[in-house]
Image (cartoon, rainbow, N blue to C red):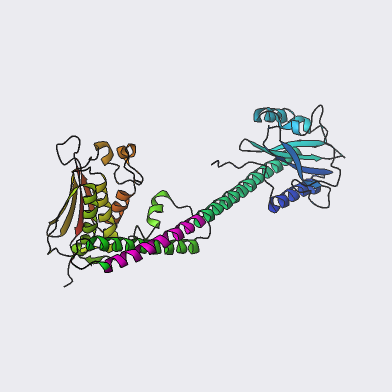
């Protein structure tokens, strides 16, 4: 996207008013008989370039950009040329032409100066005095007026360009919002049906049937999807209410603006039972592992201490790490979850016998959308899971580490992710 606006947009009333004051200065202070401010329409030096009169004196009112003039404009006296030809083929030619004729202006009664700013030619200032010729000081004054108009024209066009860009962005935002609303609506109906079917199936199974945990897992994950959809809709509604126009956020702020996935640094930490949080995830993981013919092992003591964390955030972290371990471990592989206790911390280790992480990718592993060598493979992904997990753990005051390879198998070296959390300290 270009940051330099063209000079073919309609001028604002404020710019026209400035032109009128400057022409008035010419006619009242310098006794000019008439004056005209032309602006270019279309790109300079192109075949479509035109000179459009914006302000004309004497006149009852401004002509207006792009409007037909009902009055006959004063004739510009140019030998073997036209007003448009004054724009020349390049800026150097224009500057040379007007520099060489600068002294001639003092011998003539008509003055024609280009409106030039930052290598852009925006139009012409033309004025004439019938009674006497211009002196050098008066020519300098007219040149300053031309410079003022050129700068004002540039700022005016830039402002209009920004407004146009903002309008287009807002229109695009509205279109994307409509599409997102449609998508959420389409997701809501099948999700409701899925939850209903799951509840009906659960009623048909006895408590001791082996398939009951699978049905409970379906209901648990559908409830989680329902919760995420509700929070997502609430977030969108809040953002729309707070920012009716486009809000340009720095790259490092965009991720943390989505509160339902990335809690802010002011999130209240709770005392969390790791067993209560991780058991449902393990049940779902075992079903996926069985389907993929992967051995899933969990070695977690039952008497674990509480940790300081946020339940939603920690569940998102562990879910991402377990999902990655299952995703990048081939058939006949193994995924293991263990817990290690220390005096002030608790560590959750998620290991796999998968494809491992190349050394060159390790330094970029927690960057958003970075997939490294995995992007060349057939396993789908967005490169967001580990970045989200890393930020969530940091916001909870914990740490996340990765070690790869963990074996001597060159084809399947494996990886271990370690989540370190602070143990809950009971108040005295």
Q: Farthest residue toward the bottom?
A: 428
Indicate the position of residue 31 as horizontal and vertical percent values: 82, 45
User: Front-most of 14 and 45?
Assistant: 45
Quadrant of the drawing holding the C terminus = bottom left
| Residue 272 image point, x, y percent | 22, 65
Decide if residue 310 is in sight here: no
Check residue 321 for magenta coloring: no
Dominant secondary structure (helix, strand or loop) of the stretch shown in magenta: helix
Specify the quadrant of the image occupied by residue 427: bottom left
Q: Is residue 87 left or right of residue 336?
A: right
Does 427 sit left or right of 8 as displayed?
Answer: left
Q: Which residues make up the magenta segment?
A: 178-203
Q: Residue at x 50, y 57 (%)?
A: 177
Q: Position of residue 143 (x, y in %)?
A: 71, 39
Q: Is residue 52 visible?
A: yes
- Is 324 rendered above or below residue 223? above
Up-down: is 115 above or below 245?
above
> Residue 128's quadrant in the figure?
top right
């Amino acid at each position: 996207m270009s940051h330099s606006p063209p000079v073919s947009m309609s001028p604002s009333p404020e710019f026209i008013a400035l032109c009128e004051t400057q022409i008035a200065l010419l006619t009242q202070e310098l006794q000019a008989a008439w004056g005209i401010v032309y602006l270019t329409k279309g790109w300079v030096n192109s075949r479509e370039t035109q000179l459009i009169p914006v302000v004309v004196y004497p006149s009852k009112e401004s002509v207006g950009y792009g409007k037909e003039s009902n009055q006959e404009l004063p004739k510009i006296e140019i030998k073997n040329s036209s007003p448009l030809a004054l724009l020349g083929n390049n800026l150097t030619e224009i500057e040379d032409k007007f520099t060489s004729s600068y002294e001639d202006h003092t011998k003539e009664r008509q003055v024609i100066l280009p409106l030039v700013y930052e290598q852009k030619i925006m139009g012409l200032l033309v004025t004439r005095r019938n009674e006497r010729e211009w002196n050098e000081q008066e020519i300098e004054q007219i040149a300053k007026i031309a410079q003022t108009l050129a700068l004002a024209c540039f700022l005016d066009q830039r402002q209009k360009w920004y407004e146009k860009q903002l309008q287009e962005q807002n229109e695009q935002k509205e279109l994307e919002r409509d599409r997102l609303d449609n998508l959420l609506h389409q997701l809501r109906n099948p999700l409701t049906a899925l939850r209903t079917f799951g509840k009906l199936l659960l009623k048909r199974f006895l408590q001791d049937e082996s398939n009951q945990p699978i049905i409970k897992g379906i209901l648990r994950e559908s409830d989680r999807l329902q919760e995420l959809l509700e929070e997502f809709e609430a977030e969108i509604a809040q953002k729309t209410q707070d920012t009716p126009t486009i809000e340009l956020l720095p790259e490092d702020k965009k991720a943390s603006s989505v509160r339902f996935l990335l809690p802010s640094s002011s999130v209240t930490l709770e005392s969390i039972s790791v067993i209560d949080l991780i058991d449902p995830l393990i049940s779902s993981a075992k079903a996926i592992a069985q389907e993929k013919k992967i051995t899933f092992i969990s070695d977690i003591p039952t008497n674990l201490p509480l940790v300081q964390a946020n339940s939603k955030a920690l569940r998102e972290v562990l879910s991402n790490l377990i999902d990655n371990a299952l995703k990048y471990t081939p058939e006949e592989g193994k995924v293991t979850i263990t817990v290690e206790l220390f005096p002030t911390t608790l560590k959750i280790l998620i290991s796999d016998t998968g494809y491992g992480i190349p050394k060159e990718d390790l330094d970029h592993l927690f960057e958003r959308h970075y997939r490294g060598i995995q992007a060349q493979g057939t396993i789908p992904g967005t490169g967001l899971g580990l970045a989200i997990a890393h930020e969530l753990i940091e916001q909870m005051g914990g740490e996340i580490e990765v070690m790869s390879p963990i074996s001597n198998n060159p084809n399947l070296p494996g990886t271990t992710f370690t989540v370190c959390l602070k143990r809950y300290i009971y108040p005295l």
